Amino acid sequence: MNAIIKKTLSAAAILGGFSLLGLGLTSLTFHKTEAKIQENERQALLTNLKAVIPESLYDNDIVNDTLEVTDLNQGSTKPTVIYRARQQGKPVAAVMTVITPNGYSGNISLLVAVKTDGTISGVRTLSHRETPGLGDRIEIERSDWISSFDGKSLDEPHQSQWDVKRDGGHFDQLTGATITPRAVVGAVKNALLYFKHNQARIFSTTKSTPEGGN
């Protein structure tokens, strides 16, 4: 074996050693931070859930009392998680992640909590790409418009009034932005209709299972 081959093999061995060392350190860092990341995600989820349904209304582990469904968001085949709130084992409310594609700039994701009597406990905007200063006022940090759904149902206002005022409905539009609130009103109304027609199925199990599980 000549000197050139020996140097090449030596360099390859050193490079391989550093690669394995880097891989090991990355793996070690991931495992050490994985639990922290999961806990941070859980706390963020809890914060969002608390924003739409007060903790005083339920005593179960709402984060882990879930049901996955595939028919909540039309046009999407991705499973959607529904969080179920219970008090002493009895259903209290369902918290649904609702996505509407009808925003001015694409999808708007909402968290909608509906009590078992059909009234809305709370709505929050999770994500969107609406125009800053106009459509982004669907965020609670920008205005209290999203709170106008609190306590509403398909009876109050009547189902036929679930539109923005410009379309002859009950809900205010935002100054300079009608498409965005129109999309949100429609999405919340659809969540209410879904809950009305699927309440029994949503609470038919007590385990966290995919749709149709036992």
Image: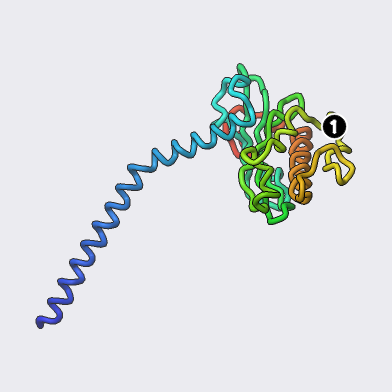
Q: Classify residue 190 as left or right of residue 32.
A: right
Q: Is residue 12 visible?
A: yes
Q: Residue at x 68, y 55 (%)?
A: 106
Q: Nearer the viewer, residue 28 or 208?
A: 28
Q: Residue at x 66, y 47 (%)?
A: 136
Q: Residue 60 placed where, x, y %?
A: 56, 23
Q: What residue would you read off at disc 1?
A: 157
Amino acid type of the residue tagged 1 in the rendering: Pro
Quadrant in the rendering for residue 66: top right
Q: Quadrant of the C terminus?
A: top right
Q: Residue 7 placed where, x, y %?
A: 14, 76
Count how many numbered circles sit on residues in the image.
1
Q: Residue 11 placed where, x, y %?
A: 18, 72
Q: Classify residue 91 as left or right of residue 162.
A: left
Quadrant in the rendering for residue 62: top right
Q: Residue 68 placed where, x, y %?
A: 62, 40
